[in-house]
Amino acid sequence: MIDQATAQRIKDAADIVEVVSDYVHLVRRGQNYMGLCPFHNERTPSFSVNRKRNFCFCFSCKKGGSPVNFIMEKEGLSYKEALLHLAKKYGIEVQERELSDEERQRQSEREGMLVANEWAMKLMEHDMVSTADGRDIGLQYLVQRGVTDAAMKAFHLGYALDSGHHLADEARKAGYDLEVLKKTGLIGTSQQGHDYDRFRGRVIFPILNNSGKVIAFGGRDLKGGLAKYINSPESAVYKKSNELYGIFQARAAIVKENKCFLVEGYMDVIGMWQSGMKNVVASSGTALTDGQIALIHRLTDNITLIYDGDAAGIKASLRGIDMLLNHKLNVKVLLLPNGEDPDSFARKHTPEEFREYVDKHETDIIRFKIDVLLDEQTARDPQKRIEAVNSVVQSIAHIPDPVARDVYVQECARLLGVTEESIIQSVGRARAMLIQKWKKEREWNATRESVAVTPQPADTVGTSSYQAQLDANTALSQQPSRKTDIPFRPLETPLIKLCVRYGYKGVFQPMDEDDDTLIDVLDYVQEELESDGMRFSVEEYSLIFQELQRVKPMFYEALQRRKMEIEEDVARKRREGIEEIGSGSYSIDELKIKESKLEESLREYAASEVNEYVKDWPARFLSSHENDIIRSTSFDLLREKHHLSNIYANAPGNEKEEDRLEMLVPRTILEWKSEILNQRLRELLRKFQDMASNMNIEEEHSLQAKLNSLMKLRRKIAKELGERILLPKSQNSNK
């Protein structure tokens, strides 16, 4: 496992602007950078990147976080893999410590699957060239298909021996857990309980992700079986909708050529690759998904779909066109001659001839769709013609750029023989319906995201050790519940937000007048809660609060380092300021005034830098935390639901939240306490009503005394809050 100090050094070095800029074109706007969100399809920028807080956030899909979280989400990596990725980017040497048994168990599944896949790939590569069956069957098939040695090596092609359980036997000898290989889909279990190789007797096409990790396999049958191809099932390392075959081999070429060719099968990719067209990937016979399109869009804006002459296949593939247009891609289509597929066409032509054919025959996507839908039979049938026009209108409606839509409307009207006015009206209606659909989808996704982890009961929170709670990560994440399940969540959320945003900021005066050290927000909250025996009833908040207390020594060490950096910066600014003053012609009095102003500005600068660091450290630490619950919950607490205009935020009269902490923190705690008393009072009143007819004098007096005590406390809190708190009339009448 990565040493904690090394992990923190990686997080401190990672610059969110640099990390995100590798994936998104950013434009500076005020204190933040803005760009199109890389996590969802959008037409106007809503993805904000804040360098000061080292944080990113999309105001539309609500995704984002620290550099670590961004890399995890974008590349589909684990926490450790994301740290290693950033360490490599910033040239930081990683020091790792030996994993404990518990840590090894938690992290082993994903890493074990990747290691097992890598081992299996190398075994099948070896078997294809080093065994008689491998050479006579697997290698012979590839040679007959014209696959070169360079392509076999680049794509790690192999052969699974047809012995039934060769891979399983070799895995046992190598010490691999067969359960891991079963999860990856390499090994199956028969009804009789026997282990067998799922890919036996097939040529193997390993599927690599964007980082070059082996995540799955495709196997081509050579015996005439029912299934020509079989693929690995989805697993912890393989999500079919987010992967493209050949993306690792094609990545550099796509960026260099600023163009991507999209084909259907494994051999199509390999055939084009070895003919010199290396910027090619395949959807592996599945319908195109948003995740696959986004994978391409990170590398280029230009994509060409290559189809063979099969009319039925072409019409079926048209369903993915609208998604491509949604992603603001420049989409073209290349139709190959009848009887040709990308593999066969590439083998029959030189790269120069292939490129010449592409330049001459690739067609704009809308024009291509019109040509496909309006064949001779459709042109003579009015109803089919109407259906074709409506289909083209739907595609135009998906285009985000209004100028591009207008151009396509004109082209569509000319080719279809329909007036521009009717096309404009139809596109307008279709786009309005799409926007409404997208809005409902966002609302639905927001509702689904409102599901949170199930906490422990309020009276048990905090009774176990911090590490025990932290180790409950996996169990908690598998027990979702609505955020409204916990009655005090709405009152605890503002308080934990203040702790996350200002936890280490000194605000409150100590009782000892001789002590000039201010009490920070975190300690004040802890003292207030302990004085009344209160704890956070929301499990995630309890974890965060305890973690903030635990890492305080780490914060003070970091603060001392930052103060030294600020002192060096102040000394440099002082030298530059004195040199600038000395270069002018000033009297003695003017020099004193300017030097005094310089020192004052330097003091303000140093104080401001320290204050900003104290405010930002807890948020930066928590949003990059290794614990999934702490990291995701902190992100939810830190993000804003709406982007506040800088003009409004800085307007006169808009007092900053941090300037009101001395009033805001106590008030938030008092409101929470008040609601606890309200709940207890309501329970007592209900009990009083339920037992009224069967209650003896002593019980009545006891309950009445409890009610009076609670009412006294409520009045005290109401006085502190500066407002009177009343029971509902229905309850007052029964008092």
Image (cartoon, grey):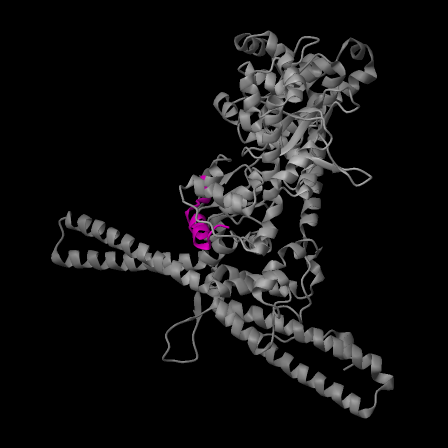
Which quadrant holds residue 493?
A: bottom right
User: In this picture, which residue range is highlighted in magenta?
Assistant: 1-18
Majority secondary structure of magenta residues: helix
Residue 383 falls in which quadrant of the image? Answer: top right
Q: Is 453 or 667 nearer to us in this picture?
A: 453
Identity of the residue drawn at 67% across and 62% down:
455
* Residue 424 among magenta residues: no
Q: Nearer the viewer, residue 394 or 363?
A: 363
Describe residue 201's horizontal placement relative to residue 68 as left or right.
right
Residue in the picture at 77% in, 25% down = 227
Residue 439 vertical placement versus 361 (above, below):
below
Left or right: 512, with 456 as reference point: left
**Residue 155 x, y percent position in the rendering:** 57, 24
Res 394 → quadrant: top right
- Position of residue 520 measured from the top left corner of the image (x, y, whole percent): 45, 68
In magenta stretch: residue 14? yes
Query: Could you say where residue 399 lies in the image, as x and y percent from the top left?
Result: 63, 27
